[in-house]
Amino acid sequence: MRTKSSNKKNINVVTLGCSKNLYDSEVLMGQLKANDKKVVHENDTNSDIVVINTCGFIGDAKEESINTILHYINEKEAGNVDKVFVTGCLSERYKPDLEKEIPDVDEYFGTHDLPNLLKVLGADYKKELVGERLTTTPKHYAYLKISEGCDRTCSFCAIPLMRGKNISQPIEQLVTEATKLAESGVKELILIAQDLTYYGLDIYGKRRLADLLKELAKLDGIEWIRLHYAYPTSFPKEVIEVMKNEEKVCNYLDIPLQHINTKILKSMRRGHNRQVTEKLLVDFRTAVSDVAIRTTLIVGYPGETQEQFEELKQWVKESRFDRLGVFAYSHEEDTYAEKLEDDVPEEIKQTRVAEIMELQAGISFDLNQQKVGKTFKCIFDKLEGDYFIGRTQYDSPDVDNEILVNAKDHYINIGKFINIKITEATDFDLIGKPVSSPQSAANSRQ
């Protein structure tokens, strides 16, 4: 076995899971860079040390995390890397088991162990760097994590076990961070948290997401502000008013609704019922007629009958969400729902997932067809193959519609806003061409 040696170790940070994990990796990388460490993100070339930021949210994510750990342990045994460290949600939740089952990892760290992780990497935790990080996204957009943890008690969710209780970041600190991002060229802020709508309750005694949005909208250079992961129960209606009145706040909302049957919602401990959910959607669409709503659902939850599933399916058909994702339920250790009998066979769960996604594909296709002939203000993220890839205000990176412009016919500057007329549409993509006249850009999809 060959052991790598280097006077200055190269540290490769590998991120698994959601954008909140990516944010944490960026903070880690910012600290390492400030300590004059050579750090890269997901680049194996000449890496002496690997730090794996794991996800422990659902079964598939856990499996991916474990497989990634095993891959780098093999690389270590082959002499291609010196050390492997593991951090993040999986490590927070299963550290004793991981230490026993995969002992060749040099050390495991939890979600709140950044100073200790930095110490073993030969770096000091610099408190003065709070709010600064080494971003990995394209230069024109960045995630802004406004709080950590979650106080919700959803029966199926283990996030509070991995991330702890909600801790909001002060408005002033977030504005400072956003200002630095804007000065570096960021035009779009994507606000993330385990629960955006809870923001402020712990430090201000009331929900202050709307106040935060107003302050961020004042920043020069920021043109779009996007909301991810808004919990429906006790949704602060003033947020919708800000969305309606503030041009910089995108008419876009990512809100996980999970189900519509009241009995299932009660068992899920969601804090709302069908009537409340439907009224919320009406309120959104009444206040902001062109709001794009993205949601997630769970099928095969313990006790879900065929009748309850058909109710969910009909509701999806009627609600016509812009985007929708579906998870097949699986037990999570130490959650409330684990006490319930997982009585829906896996085959039926997967059939229900497929049925909902097929239905949603048709809805998405219909909604996209309505965009043909209209012009939208778009920002472009990358050149991929023969196409420049962009988005409207109604689309978030990686999960929503992509705007495709043929690179053989048109040249577009990455990170720039440009008006695009839609000429073709599929269920997941919009194809268009640049137009020179800004007055035709659509603010409404109606």
Image: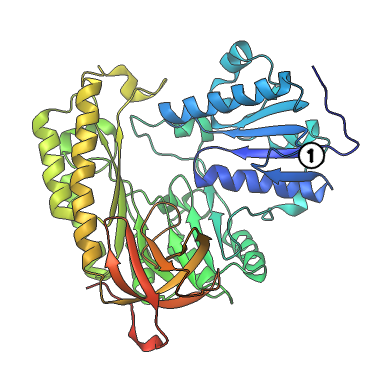
Q: As drawn, is 129 to the left or to the right of 392?
A: right
How many numbered markers are drawn?
1
For the question of whether residue 106 can be seen, the reply is: no
Residue 121 sits in quarter: top right
Q: Residue at x 21, y 18 (%)?
A: 343
Q: Tell which of 398 and 167 is nearer to you.
A: 398
- Most extreme residue toward the right is 7
Q: Which residue is drawn at 63% across and 59% down?
A: 173
Query: x%, y% of residue 326?
Result: 29, 39
Query: x%, y% of residue 361?
Result: 23, 50
For the question of whether residue 413 can be seen, the reply is: yes
Q: In this view, does 72 lie above or below 321?
A: above
- Most extreme residue toward the top is 100
Q: What element carries label 1?
A: strand
Quarter of the image that includes the N terminus: top right
Q: As drawn, is 147 to the left or to the right of 85?
A: left
Residue 261 sits in quarter: top left
- Most extreme residue toward the left is 307
Q: Tell which of 178 and 310 is nearer to you.
A: 310
Q: As drawn, is 63 to the left or to the right of 273?
A: right
Q: Name the kind of residue labelled 1 in the image.
A: Asn
Q: In this view, does 260 lie above or below 381?
A: above
How many C-alpha atoms fall within 10 Å of the one at disc 1: few (<14), some, or many (≥20)? Answer: some
Q: Residue at x 87, y 39 (%)?
A: 8
Query: What residue is pinned by disc 1?
Result: 10
Colour logic: rainbow
Query: x%, y% of residue 390?
Result: 45, 65
- Most extreme residue toward the front is 408
Q: Tell which of 131 and 324 is nearer to you.
A: 324
Q: As drawn, is 270 to the left or to the right of 38?
A: left
Query: x%, y% of residue 18?
Result: 49, 43
Quarter of the image that includes the C terminus: bottom left
